[in-house]
Image (cartoon, grey):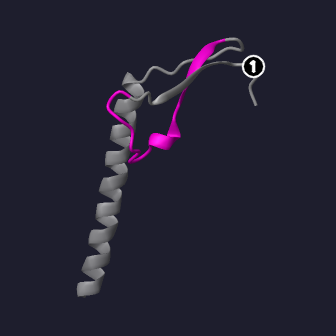
């Protein structure tokens, strides 16, 4: 009986997490500005060496570039 209740609670929590994640995604997508890049555009590239706990200084650049887009894969 107790294990059955525990499994029900786990399923309910999983459902609530899923609903919350969908709400967070909807809010992000509503505010996000997706860009349509073209060949020849100049872009910056995020420097992954600083993720997640990179030892960069306060004034170190977190971006690499600028780079020109030559083609799309």
The magenta segment is 41-59
Residue 16 falls left or right of residue 22:
left
Residue 55 falls left or right of residue 9:
right
The image shows residue 41 at horizontal and vertical percentages of 64, 12
- In this figure, which residue is indicated by the disc labeled 1? 70
Task: Write the residue at 44% across / 27% down.
Answer: 61
The image shows residue 10 at horizontal and vertical percentages of 31, 70
Front-most of 44 and 29? 44
Specify the quadrant that holds the N terminus.
bottom left
Judge whether 16 appears above or below 24 on screen.
below
Judge whether 51 appears above or below 69 on screen.
below
Front-most of 11 and 21? 21
Task: Write the residue at 40% across / 29% down.
Answer: 60
Q: Secondary structure at mark 1?
A: loop
Task: Write the residue at 28% across / 85% down.
Answer: 3
Front-most of 37 and 13? 37
Toward which corner of the image does residue 6 lie, by quadrant? bottom left
The image shows residue 14 at horizontal and vertical percentages of 35, 61
Task: Write the residue at 26% across / 70% down.
Answer: 9
Judge whether 22 appears above or below 36 on screen.
below
Front-most of 73 and 31? 73
Please tell me whether residue 67 belongs to the stretch shown in magenta: no
The image shows residue 64 at horizontal and vertical percentages of 55, 27
């Amino acid at each position: 009986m107790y294990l059955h209740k525990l499994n029900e609670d786990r399923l309910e929590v999983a459902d609530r997490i899923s609903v919350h994640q969908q709400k967070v995604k909807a809010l992000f997508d509503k505010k996000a500005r997706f860009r349509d890049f073209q060949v020849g555009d100049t872009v910056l590239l995020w420097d992954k060496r600083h993720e997640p706990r990179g030892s960069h200084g306060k004034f170190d650049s977190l971006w690499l570039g600028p780079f020109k887009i030559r083609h799309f894969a």
